[in-house]
Amino acid sequence: MSLFRLKRQISYWLNARHRRGHGIHSPYLFGLLTNVIENDGNYYAYETIDGVWASLMRSNVKVPGSTSTHEDVPEKLKLLVRRFDLLPKYGKMLFRLINEFQPKNIVCIGPVTGMTSLYLAKADSRIPVNHYDGKKELLPVTKYLLETAEVENVKIHDGLPEFSSLEMKDAFVVLSYPEDPARCHEIIQNMVRNLDEMPKAIVVNGIHQSREMEESWSELTTNEFVRVSLDFFTLGLAICLPDLQKENFVIRY
């Protein structure tokens, strides 16, 4: 962990006040926080996804084409999963949010290994999930995980989407570039520039990973179409529902 991120994490734990709806006056946001985001109930799909996660964490398999930070050798798959994918508690949060928002489609952009895709896809098998710009050496892992979990509603695309023609109306968007802030910033700018119709929500992973990621998150949330932003430190949730009052919260999670 970088010194920058460590300082931000300490500040977060000292200053994040909103939990269990404390200080949230909007009935809608109070219900979203207490009944959805902080819901600790179990879902049938969790069993399958938890089993995949546990299997990955026990594995010592190394991924060809990946390179360790400190050595010129392939990196272990379980370390790549922890670097690029969301930890289970955040993946399950996205699962519940998709159940709540019921988007028309889900757009995932970034080098996730497949665990994040599982949470997105298993939330509702009727909702298509389109995954763009995956890390090349991780795509076989992603495909394997989806096949193992018998997921059929995920389509993997090479490179970035063409935002001018991407169906964003009532979509649920996940951007995951914690280690590539320049790429994340470029995508946010392109996406915002081409937004003719609004998604329901945009999730950004790694919003406090670096100063550049913080700036990208801040730039996104200052847009008028983002009505509410929720900062969970590891990720940020920008809600774009037009009837909400514009507010920003730091949630202790």
Image (spheres, grey):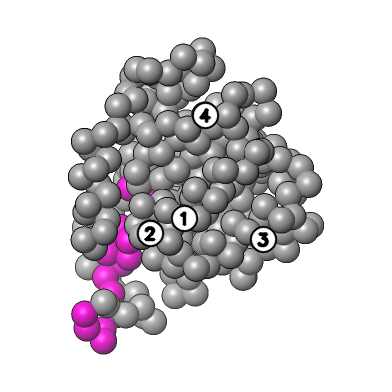
Q: Look at the numbered discs 1 and 3 and tell me whether their residues touch, using CB distance below 8 Å.
A: no
- Does residue 242 lie above or below 216 as drawn? above
Query: Which type of secondary structure does the marked residue at label 1 adopt?
Result: helix
Q: Amino acid at mark 3?
A: Asn
Mark 1 crowdedness (10 Å alpha carbons): few <14, some 14-19, many ≥20: some
Dot 4 and dot 1 residues touching (CB under 8 Å): no
Callout 3: few (<14), some (14-19), or many (20+) C-alpha neighbours within 10 Å?
some
- Mark 1–mark 3 Cα distance, whole angstroms, equals 16 Å
| Crowding near the residue tagged with mark 2, few <14, some 14–19, many ≥20 C-alpha atoms within 10 Å | some
Q: Nearer the viewer, residue 160 or 122?
A: 160
Ranked by sequence position, the earlier of labels 3 and 2 is 3
Tell me whether the residue at label 3 lies in contact with that at label 4, contact meaning CB atoms closer than 8 angstroms: no
Q: Nearer the viewer, residue 60 or 192?
A: 192
Q: Is residue 91 above or below residue 178?
A: above
Residue tagged 1: 215
N-terminal of the pair, mark 2 or mark 4, is 2
Task: Report x, y in % for residue 64.
Answer: 36, 80
Left or right: residue 114 versus residue 168 is left
Q: Earlier in the sequence, mark 4 or mark 1?
A: 1
Q: Which residue is mark 2?
A: 211
* Residue that badge 3 annotates: 190
- In the rendered image, residue 68, in percent from the top left (x then y), is placed at 27, 77
Q: Which quadrant of the structure image shows residue 55?
A: bottom left
Task: Report, in whole angstroms, how far the alpha carbon at label 4 lies from the one at label 1.
Answer: 18 Å
Q: Going from the N terminus, do you reach mark 1 or mark 3 first?
A: 3
Disc number lying in front (3 or 4):
4
Q: Amino acid at mark 1?
A: Glu
The answer to which of marks 3 and 4 sits earlier in the sequence is: 3
Mark 1 and mark 2: Cα distance apart in space: 6 Å
The quadrant of the image that shows the N terminus is bottom left
